[in-house]
Image (cartoon, helix red, strand yellow):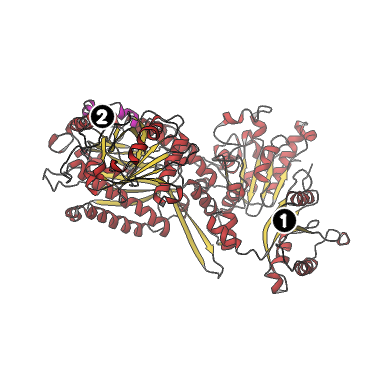
Amino acid sequence: MAGMRRVNGKFSAINPAVSCCRLRQVQSLLCEGSTTTPDGILCSLGIDSRYNEGCTELAKYLFYELYGKNQLNLEHAFEEFPEEILDDVILLIKAECVHLYCNPVNYNHLLPYVSHWRNLHLYCMTEAEYEDEEAAEEFKISSFVTMVQDCYHIGVPYSSQGHIQSFDMFMVEKWPLLQAFALDGIGGGSFFTLKYKLMDMSEKLWQVYNRLDPVSLDHVLTEDLVNFEKQWSCFFSSMDLESHLSILELSEAQAGEAFRIYYSHGLISSNITDKSKSQQPFVLFGKHSSLEDLESYSFNFPSESHQVRSTGTGGSTAKHMILQCVAPKGPLACSRTYFFGSTHTPYLENQNPQQKKTEVLLLSQIYSAAVQAVLSGIKCYSCTSSATKAKDVAENTFFMGLDSANLSQYRSPLRSKCEFKIQAVNRQGRIIPLTDEESRYVVKTASMIVHDIPDLQWNRGDLGSVVFSESFLESSINIQQKDGTVSSDSCYTILTTTVPRYACWLMESDVKQSEQAQHLIKKEEGTCLGTALTAADAAYVFSSSQLSTPEEGKIIFFSEGLLFVHSQFGSITLPKDQISNIKFYDPDLGGVATLFVEYESSLLPHLPFPLHSSDQCLVFALQPRSKSYRAFYSKVLSVWKKSDSGLRLQMMDKQDLTWSQKNMHTRLQKLHDSQEPPVAKRRGSLKTSYSQLPEQDMFLQHFALSSIGQEPILYDHLGVLFPSAELRNAVQSQGDKVVVTIITGLPGSHKKRLCDFLIQLNKDRGRWVVYEPSPDSSDSFSAAHLQQFLSGFLESQRGPGGKPRLLVLSPGYTDALDVVQAVLFHPDPVVQACFTIGAVTACVNPLASCMEHR
């Protein structure tokens, strides 16, 4: 599994574990046992197949970095020989073996992919032989004849997913390779289609291609997701250009332009026929977001007439918009509900602590319940793989969210108007049934729409709809416990989690309130915050709310509180009377310093809604070496530490932080590490890309295991395959056993050199003992002799001191399985229980032996 690991955030160019897994997926199509199952799948590249796109697509799947889409990356690697040399490949895949023809030039580039393939038959000339063009062509034809001689049915990947064609075996017959098959003397002596029955395997292969594995997931994360996030960045950039006055003239067509161009341009080069409403981008304002409007919407005809100023109830200003971005040629999609106007009033003096119910606040609370519902539904589905159970959990969570927001009166009206669903989407962007086996390994979209929300408070008809959805991927592995029982371990990752779940833009009344709060900076005394100690400097605000993302703004420290100014939330004031505790954590060594401000519940009406959290704590991040960081130490810390300041300030160490506080600090630290220098403009790009999320590495390791298959994994092996502290400790409890490392390989594979290297490498770290058969045994392996050695070895190691490791070097052409069985099935159960196999390493020297013409 070492091949599954990342290097510097990316997979290395060649991943043997994935290469073998992909081959097995293709070979599984040949094990179905029906009368229509072919004996093999033929793939010929370049001119030999008239540049068939289906064959090229199969080659891209098996040799992913070698025949990838971006040929520009290959120019330097293959500039010494033309493309037709690279394409000089014939591949015949059978259920139990693979036949591969290549030339001595492209051989070294193919070798890293195929060297791990089981039962590989390689047809390759020497460099000297290949210089004779006529002899090389004859060798290719005779190799092809040898490949197919045991076949009757042969499958062909005729079409690619981007260019579907009707299968025509007579067009296949025109391939130069198949034409040459009919040549007398070197060919088969008859037309290929008379001797062999051809069939199209394209559709079955497409299902294999759409199955995600670590390499294809890496492509989704590093290319598809990056492009997807860019569209949201473009949306926010265009919205941030609007003032509180100009935004009133904004139309749905203008707001959704970035999503629409991204989607329509992508469709031009794709072959997606599914135009379902759930898989198209949209932006709808206010009351014009009813279910009827959603169902009749077409992204090709966005509305210019529906503007922010007139799409609210009764022709008033819209209070919200719903929007969805969809990747045109991929599985990613997510929808959000954003708002026009703020939910809070900045705290200035002794004000009414009761929060005024506004339409923006009401819709925000219903939207928050929908967000919680979708996230709980995703969690349930990842554990149960049941869409029905996930739907029940999501709906229950939604109504509990309404209750917690004191909106119980909306339970009955919204019961029939909230819809939760999970859809599986393949890599081409097509929705597939969750009941299909292939849906297990594709991205899914979980969504909730609450449509036609009635206005129960002001009786002005319907307020429109709120929507929320996320793209996610789950992973599940089966673990065989020590007692033989099998349990399941699941986890999931939300791919679109970095798209802000909540956003708002200030309207005219909000701007005036925000400016009023900022006047506190100019007053020297008599304010609820005391005296200003610092100027406005950059900082981030964050909370543990599911709606919150780190937001950049300006922070001003006062003697009796602080003021935070944000371009979209407006002004946030935190006076000492509303602060219960302040905890300051500074990790030093270039780490982000964080202020954890715990506040009273009476402050909630004066905080933006997405910052409300159950722990009643706001986090302010001060980046190292920033003006706000230096000012806090030089001007603020000494004042706040005074007993008469009215502020309770605690200096914290890392071990004093709660799990939630550590998680928030980690995310803020990763955000800082990814943005040097800090980005001045909010949302000019999404603040955190998916690759910087702290939980990503854990999921990728889990998915690397689950994508191989659902065969149970022994519990004792988890410490190596899935390294975590808990599992490592569990495995280390078996320290009384002797670990056996088996090194095997054919003669000439340099296995003895590897053995000597390991001994030399570890001579200072512990004792290693090597088992080598006696010279008299020639190249034969004796299980009895090894078992006798193990018994004697155990007897000689009794007494104090740590257990040594044992290296077993297999002789000659010994099958590694014979050595493994000799260790695991020792006739003495006492001896058997004292040994465990740590690793089996097979040395391969592809230039040494077992290869014709070399």
Membership of 237 in magenta stretch: yes
Q: Nearer the viewer, residue 395 or 272?
A: 395
Looking at the rendered structure, the number of numbered marks drawn on it comes to 2
Q: Position of residue 83 (x, y in %)?
A: 64, 30
Give the residue at x 33% y 50%: 374
Q: Separation of disc 1 and disc 2 at Cα?
A: 67 Å
What amino acid type should be assigned to the residue bearing mark 2? Ile
Residue furthest to the right in view is 776
* Tag in front: 1 or 2: 2
Residue furthest to the front in view is 643
Q: Nearer the viewer, residue 666 or 368?
A: 666
Residue 509 appears in view: yes
Disc on res. 737 = none
Horizontal side of residue 127 vs 147, given as left or right? right
Q: Secondary structure at mark 1?
A: loop
Horizontal side of residue 635 vs 209, given as left or right? left
Membership of 360 in magenta stretch: no
The main secondary structure of the magenta stretch is: helix
Disc on res. 766 = 1
What amino acid type should be assigned to the residue bearing mark 1? Gly
Q: Nearer the viewer, residue 351 or 300?
A: 351
Q: Which residues are magenta?
A: 236-250
Q: Position of residue 600 (x, y in %)?
A: 25, 48
- Mark 2 sits on what residue? 521
Quarter of the image for residue 832 reads: bottom right
